[in-house]
Amino acid sequence: MTVHPDDPAPNPHATQAQVEAALKDTKLAQVLYHDWEAETYDDKWSISYDERCIAYARGRFDLAVGPAPLPYERALELGCGTGFFLLNLMQGGIAESGSVTDLSPGMVKVALRNAEHLGLDVDGRVADAETIPYDDDTFDLVCGHAVLHHIPDVELALKECLRVLKPGGRFVFAGEPTTIGNIYARRLGQATWKVTTEVTKLPFLSGWRRPQTELDESSRAAALEAVVDLHTFDPDDLEKMAKSAGAVDVKATTEELAAALWGWPVRTFEAAVPEEKLTVGYRMAQYRAWLGLSWLDENVLRKVVPREFFYNAMITGVKPGAAQK
């Protein structure tokens, strides 16, 4: 595991003054918000590096790309977070070695730690997706999960992806909010947070309430969400953007409608209550519910509901040149 020696150190506890400054500086907000979340991000989003999330990551790749000759030799993840997408794709046979980048030093630190624990061949850089610090024609695959909506100039970032890809190389981005999906997801999340934090003030439910200091810190970080979440996407517009960046073989796909309507309140509730209340049995029950609703989305709703109503968007494209994967 290697990280560039000149990369900055994580800052997991932003001051109020820093938060106020970040409200006017989206890239500072990205760093502060994601440094704050880095050490707890996997728990917050129920991220793991076992068969459950390997299957999820591989499923997103397969849905976006379809059949492809595998594995890719070298892959890059932009906005890696804790490494969820690339590390699970590598375990799922998609890539042999990889590099992770994120604007947040805290996220790069956690991603490299996760890679080391898994025994994966991964290096990392603190980097801006609009100026990727790698040479032209370096990677066979560039990927990302829930990252494009954080980038100020998405088309510029896609052009950078194409620059660092080898001819015929592919980019795959998943987990991006659609414009319609973002509306109902945010409203559900906000309502769930308000109800949960108010109800747990009752004396007989005090054991279900996180310490006020944690709730206050969560609220302070949440204040930056309006700054760090810059875009939502219409699938048609996302395809046009990728083509304008210079990609060929472009395709946008969407998923999760019933699963999102269920999942957003569940995840918000989990963030508002003490960790010890979320038993293994509870987590397995939620996972089974998500699987069932995802089946409904894939096998029923996808056939009758327009793609822009689903919550998650995926986009893939290829750099013109050699034989495509």
Image (cartoon, helix red, strand yellow):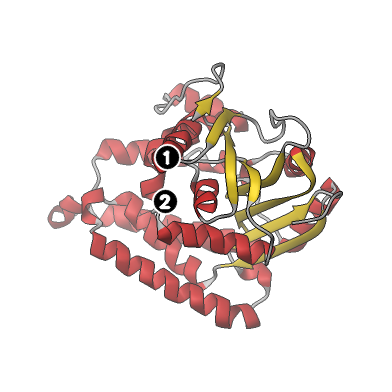
Q: Looking at the picture, does residue 213 appear above or below residue 186?
A: above
- The amino acid type found where label 1 is placed reads Asn
Occupied quadrant, residue 97: top right
Q: Looking at the picture, does residue 20 appear above or below residue 316?
A: above
Q: Are marks 1 and 2 in contact (CB under 8 Å)?
A: yes
Image quadrant containing the C terminus = bottom right
| Residue 114, position as x, y percentages in the image | 42, 40
**Could you say which disc has been placed on residue 114 in the image?**
1
Q: Is mark 2 on a helix, strand or loop?
A: loop
Q: Of callouts 1 and 2, which one flags the residue occurring earlier in the amino acid sequence?
A: 2
Q: What element carries label 1?
A: helix
Label 2, on which residue? 49
Position of 161 compared to 96: left or right?
right
CA separation in Å, label 1 and label 2: 9 Å
| Residue 265, position as x, y percentages in the image | 40, 62
Which of 136 and 206 lies nearest the eye of the viewer?
136
Position of 84 compared to 208: left or right?
right
Q: Looking at the picture, does residue 215 appear above or below residue 46?
A: above
Position of 13 compared to 325: left or right?
left
| Residue 281, position as x, y percentages in the image | 24, 65
Q: Report the residue that reaches farthest toward the top.
A: 6
Q: Report the residue that reaches farthest toward the left.
A: 204
- The amino acid type found where label 2 is placed reads Tyr
Which of 39 and 85 lies nearest the eye of the viewer?
85
